């Protein structure tokens, strides 16, 4: 376990900024105590200082997880967000997409969101903007990338993809063993 | 207790899967049997016989066939040897068959007389054959016994019947017979054939129970609150969608968890901002409940020795939005060395699983004495390291909750009693207002009287998995150290000389110690760096004459040592 290097921090924050923009600041400066990012076995964990102290005393090879896993660095040192980060992305997300109840299931099985399943979308979402996907009951379901801007969404046919799927909470069941 | 969790309302709809299987097997078997053999399936079933399905005694194919034969036998005089066809078939070579037949006949006599008296009727008396009859006799042995028959014979027969009917191993059934009085035993065995109701726990970190219930009802789930004792539990009766894959589940609004798993956490009663250790955490249900009660404050160390099972822990904790947890993969026995100073420790010890037979019927046959003792040994090691990891000086805590999903005395009371002897702990009430008291005496063993404050839960009385919960308070102010040969916490007024529950290595150690003492060497206790405070604290205790025979020895040694150090 170690703190992130400069480069890793930059790569990760760039990725995070796609979804939560400048709200990222709120993750770092929290009123309820200091939080930090730590790298352990290529995974990035977001932990409070107090928890970090406890985790320090666990032998490195015995440590499985601490705090919240945000994602992992790939072998080509890109950063990939995991669904486990959703708890922190959802409250700060700038651009959101709501899917209709009928399309919920499809999204949770790992499919893209089609125009026919699109319930609402934040105004002026740009194309390829990172978005958090919600159900109509405002339950965060995952995140992805807008395939079309809000304007374009109005025009496209019902079967066109509007959000590319990146991660969804169905992965807790589908990929339980690769989450960390 | 929830309305639907009420054990008295449990209903079994006809013969279950097991009975069907068994019947199938018997039909198969019949094909291979020569014609002269007693099993004959083409006895027409009389309508009145069919009605005897839902009767007092559980009805199954075996039992049914038995009864047919009993009828058959009554008609034709000369066929005594066929008294127990389905069993008798297989046991033809068996030497105890003779005994069976004998006793059977005796059981038959009263019942057939009854029938002659009442003239018609009641196939039910037939169906409810030996075990209840047997049980009747055993209940009122003085009056109902057959002359010249020992109680033991009745018991042996009952044992055999139950083993055959419920397909338990001899060993396990014997253990169960020791634990339960006979009528209760049948209830217990019967309850193990029925699955427990599915229960879920609301994740209050993300939602409220009312909202969750509404959301699930909208998905076509039929549910109810779990009971007065739980504010977060819900019972699921039936559902049109898989409960383990609804969007609510995936979003972490609830956790699938047996009702009995709520209890240890309620006993643990974690407070906010505490430091808590969950020693055997997989699959993370209890850990997340702790986090939920702490509102994600403080820190939790969730440990499990199995890396594989930890995957589900990590998944579940993230899904439920638990952020105050470190997950580690250490051996629980390493714990005081690895880290200590926890406010509370939950030890959900690995066990033989005799409380969850309805979940895993394999337990019926695949456990033997060795397995139980192996578990018990591991549990003793774990409970000591759990106690050592607790900081007794903690302002809010200093508690250890020990629980198992086993109902064996060896894995429960015995282990706790061992801990009471070995460490500065005492039992405190669990804070659960239901459940049965733990045993303070069992067969020839006498445990510490305070073991009454532990709690046992059974499938047939509480309609949840069999469970044992003990809450210990560590009261020594000293920093947790290995304190060997400690007197039990509470000074009982009259403590019987308890037969020492010795596990093997421990007895070895004791022998070793004795031999060392004999040599007159000054003992070098490996891990104890007993502070002077501890010694002072114990001085008065060891000065008091102890009534215990075995316990006195180490004590006197200690006194000796203290004396030395005092000089």
Image (cartoon, helix red, strand yellow):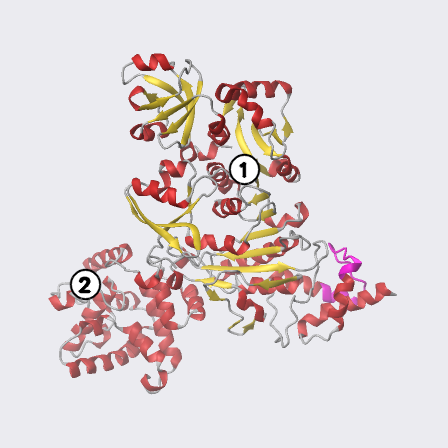
Q: In the visual, does B182 lie left or right of A28?
A: left
Q: Is residue B39 magenta?
A: no
Q: Quadrant of the C terminus of chain B?
A: bottom right
Q: x%, y% of residue B238?
A: 29, 48
Task: Sort mark 2 into few (<14), some (14-19) or many (20+) by Cα contacts within 10 Å.
Answer: few
Q: Furthest residue to the right?
A: B567
Which is nearer the eye, B234 or B186?
B234
Q: Marks 2/1: CA distance?
A: 68 Å
Q: Which residues are magenta?
A: B513-534
The disc at residue B323 is 1
At mark 2, the secondary structure is: loop
Q: Are marks 2 and 1 in contact (CB under 8 Å)?
A: no
Name above or below for residue B151 compared with residue B490.
below
Q: x%, y% of residue A20?
A: 50, 22
Which chain's residue wears label 1? B
Residue drawn at (42%, 30%), measured in percent from left and top?
A140
Q: Quadrant of residue B461?
A: bottom left
The residue wearing badge 2 is B34
Q: Are marks 2 and 1 on the same chain?
A: yes
Q: In the visual, does B111 lie left or right of B502?
A: left
Which is nearer the eye, B403 or B500?
B403
Q: x%, y% of residue B507?
A: 64, 64
Q: x%, y% of residue B546?
A: 70, 74
Residue drawn at (34%, 40%), measured in percent from left and top?
B215
Which is nearer the eye, B2 or B401?
B2
Which is nearer the eye, B290 or A23?
A23
Task: Sort mark 1 into few (<14), some (14-19) or many (20+) by Cα contacts within 10 Å.
Answer: many
Name above or below for residue B144 compared with residue B511.
below
How many numbered dots are placed on residues in this image?
2
């Amino acid at each position: 376990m170690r703190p992130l290097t400069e480069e890793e921090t930059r790569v990760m924050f760039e990725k995070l900024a796609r979804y939560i923009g400048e709200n990222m600041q709120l993750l770092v400066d929290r009123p309820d105590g200091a939080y930090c990012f730590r790298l352990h076995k290529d995974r990035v964990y977001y932990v409070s200082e107090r928890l970090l102290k406890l985790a320090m005393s666990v032998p490195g090879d015995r440590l499985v997880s601490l705090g919240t896993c945000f994602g992992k660095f790939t072998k080509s040192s890109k950063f990939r967000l995991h669904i486990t980060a959703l708890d922190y992305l959802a409250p700060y997300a700038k651009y959101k997409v709501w899917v209709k109840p009928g399309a919920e299931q499809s999204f949770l099985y790992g499919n893209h969101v089609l125009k026919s399943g699109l319930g609402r979308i934040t105004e002026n979402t740009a194309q390829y903007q990172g978005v958090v996907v919600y159900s109509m009951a405002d339950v965060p379901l995952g995140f992805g990338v807008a395939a079309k801007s809000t304007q374009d969404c109005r025009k496209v046919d019902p079967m066109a993809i509007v959000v590319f799927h990146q991660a969804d909470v169905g992965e807790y069941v589908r990929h339980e063993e690769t989450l960390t | 207790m929830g309305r639907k969790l009420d054990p008295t309302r449990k209903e079994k709809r006809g013969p279950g899967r097991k009975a069907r299987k068994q019947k199938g097997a018997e039909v198969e078997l019949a094909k291979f049997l020569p014609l002269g053999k007693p099993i004959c399936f083409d006895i027409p079933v009389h309508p009145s016989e069919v009605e005897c399905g839902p009767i007092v005694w559980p009805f199954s194919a075996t039992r049914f066939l038995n009864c047919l034969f009993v009828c058959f036998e009554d008609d034709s005089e000369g066929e005594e040897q066929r008294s127990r066809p389905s069993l008798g078939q297989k046991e033809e070579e068996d030497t105890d068959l003779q005994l069976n037949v004998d006793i059977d006949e005796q059981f038959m006599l009263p019942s057939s007389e009854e029938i002659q008296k009442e003239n018609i009727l009641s196939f039910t008396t037939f169906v409810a054959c030996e075990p209840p009859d047997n049980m009747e006799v055993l209940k009122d042995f003085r009056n109902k016994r057959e002359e010249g028959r020992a109680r033991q014979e009745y018991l042996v027969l009952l044992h055999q019947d139950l083993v055959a009917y419920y397909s338990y191993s001899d060993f396990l059934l014997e253990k169960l017979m020791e634990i339960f009085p006979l009528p209760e035993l049948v209830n217990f065995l019967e309850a193990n054939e029925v699955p427990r109701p599915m229960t879920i726990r609301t994740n209050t970190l993300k939602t409220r129970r009312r909202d969750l219930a509404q959301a699930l009802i909208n998905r076509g789930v039929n549910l109810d609150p779990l009971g007065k004792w739980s504010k977060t539990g819900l019972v699921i009766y039936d559902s049109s969608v898989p409960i383990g894959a609804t969007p609510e589940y995936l979003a972490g609004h609830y956790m699938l968890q047996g009702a009995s798993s709520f209890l240890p956490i309620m006993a643990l009663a974690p407070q906010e901002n505490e430091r808590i250790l969950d020693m055997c955490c997989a699959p993370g249900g209890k850990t997340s409940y702790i986090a939920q009660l702490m509102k994600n404050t403080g820190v939790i160390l969730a440990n499990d020795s199995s890396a594989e099972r930890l995957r589900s822990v990590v998944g579940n904790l993230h899904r439920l939005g638990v952020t105050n947890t470190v997950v580690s993969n250490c051996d629980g026995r390493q714990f005081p060395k690895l880290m200590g100073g926890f406010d509370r420790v939950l030890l959900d010890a690995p066990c033989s699983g005799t409380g969850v037979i309805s979940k895993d019927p394999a337990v019926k046959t695949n456990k033997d004495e060795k397995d139980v003792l192996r578990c018990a040994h591991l549990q003793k090691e774990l409970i000591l390291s759990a106690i050592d990891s607790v900081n007794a000086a903690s302002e809010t805590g200093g508690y250890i909750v020990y629980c198992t999903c086993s109902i064996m005395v060896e894995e429960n009371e015995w282990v706790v009693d061992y801990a009471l002897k070995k460490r500065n702990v005492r039992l405190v009430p669990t804070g659960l207002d239901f459940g049965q008291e733990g045993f303070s005496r069992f067969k020839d063993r006498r445990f510490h009287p305070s073991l009454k404050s532990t709690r046992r839960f059974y499938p047939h009385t509480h309609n949840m998995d069999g469970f044992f919960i003990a809450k210990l308070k560590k009261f020594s102010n000293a920093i947790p150290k290995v304190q060997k040969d400690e007197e039990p916490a509470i000074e009982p007024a009259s403590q019987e000389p308890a037969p020492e529950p010795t596990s093997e290595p421990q007895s070895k150690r004791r022998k070793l110690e004795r031999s060392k003492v004999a040599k007159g060497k000054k003992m070098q206790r490996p891990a104890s760096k007993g502070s002077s405070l501890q010694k002072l604290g114990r001085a008065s205790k060891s000065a008091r004459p102890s009534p215990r025979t075995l316990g006195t020895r180490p004590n006197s040694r200690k006194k000796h040592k203290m004396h030395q150090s005092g000089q």
